[in-house]
Image (cartoon, rainbow, N blue to C red):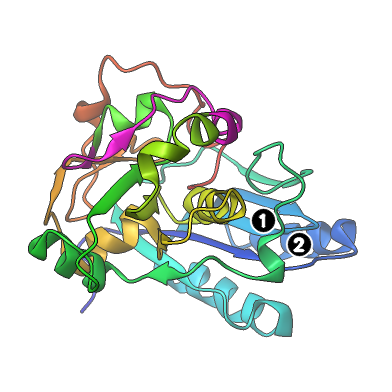
Amino acid sequence: MPSPLPVLNIAAYQFLALGELAVLEDALKQVLAPAGIKGTVLLAHEGINLFLAAPAEPLRAFLGWLRQDPRFAQLQAKESWSRSQPFRKLLVKIKPEIIRMDHPAIQPSSGRAPALSPAVLKRWLDAGHDDNARPVVLLDTRNRYETACGTFKDAIDWQLDKFTQFPAAAQAHLADLAGKTVVSFCTGGIRCEKAAIFMREQGLENVYQLDGGILRYFEEQGAAHYEGGCFVFDERRVVDPDLAPQPAWADGYPLAAKAGESPAR
């Protein structure tokens, strides 16, 4: 069913080994710019991270083009809609990491942490425990200005100013997480995937990432067990559990990134 709103927003990432980044950067620019698609694409040797917006037809045509490359055939995109273009420009950029953690030992392309679907997470939260009767702990891996706009009920929030602080915070709280089932979550899945891999490297056994992050959870489960909205890195600022823009919810919060310059994470 078509959306009543004219602009499609997509968020996607994929960890994989990428080479010839400059060639890929140029190819993306040549396809995206003439189509009038705006947003951000980050490229690194560890993968791709993007958040783009445009009318549905050119944006879905771009995704079809990208998936013709065997490396991106399985790329999954989360969709939401807005009344106007939330990005000011197009930015395609090569970076050392598609999400900076300053922990180079983590290589998600060599193996993912177990991913938990939104449906299973809701079932566990409804029950108050996982399928093995272990207590479930939700760990918010986002920054404090994001968590201020909304998060899961009773989630752990270490009040991070930036994701590079996550490894030290996790190491300081390992004893608190031991013996529990830990589900890390973030906006679109990329930070919580790296976070889950790091925690498993530190010896925590029962660690999962929320597959697709909050945005996919909203898409499939709505507001169940969630309070508030989800901060997004564009001019919409915040979307509610119906994935509708709610910019007023972010009023007064210190926004650490300029709209249109950072992809969803």
Q: Which type of secondary structure does the marked residue at label 2 adopt?
A: helix
Residue 45 is situated, as x and y percent measured from the top left of the image, at: 80, 57
Q: Quadrant of residue 246?
A: top left
Q: Is residue 246 left or right of residue 172?
A: left
Q: Is residue 226 left or right of residue 55?
A: left
Q: Is residue 240 left or right of residue 224?
A: right
> Is residue 34 shown above or below 82?
below
Residue 233 visible within the image:
no
Q: Which residue is mark 2?
A: 30
> Is residue 235 shown above or below 72?
above
Residue 83 is situated, as x and y percent measured from the top left of the image, at: 28, 49
Using the image as rendered, state which of residue 65 and residue 117 is in the foreground.
117
Contact flag, marks 2 and 1 (Cβ < 8 Å)? yes
Which residue does the image show at 52% across and 56% down from the upper left?
Answer: 193
Residue 155 is situated, as x and y percent measured from the top left of the image, at: 25, 40
Using the image as rendered, state which of residue 190 and residue 240 is in the foreground.
190
Residue kind at label 2, given as amino acid type: Gln
Q: Which mark is residue 33?
A: 1
> Is residue 46 shown above or below 2?
above
Which residue does the image show at 76% across and 62% down from the upper left?
Answer: 30
Query: In the rendered structure, does residue 190 fall within the stretch colored magenta?
Result: no
Residue 171 visible within the image:
yes
Segment tinted magenta in the rendering: 151-168
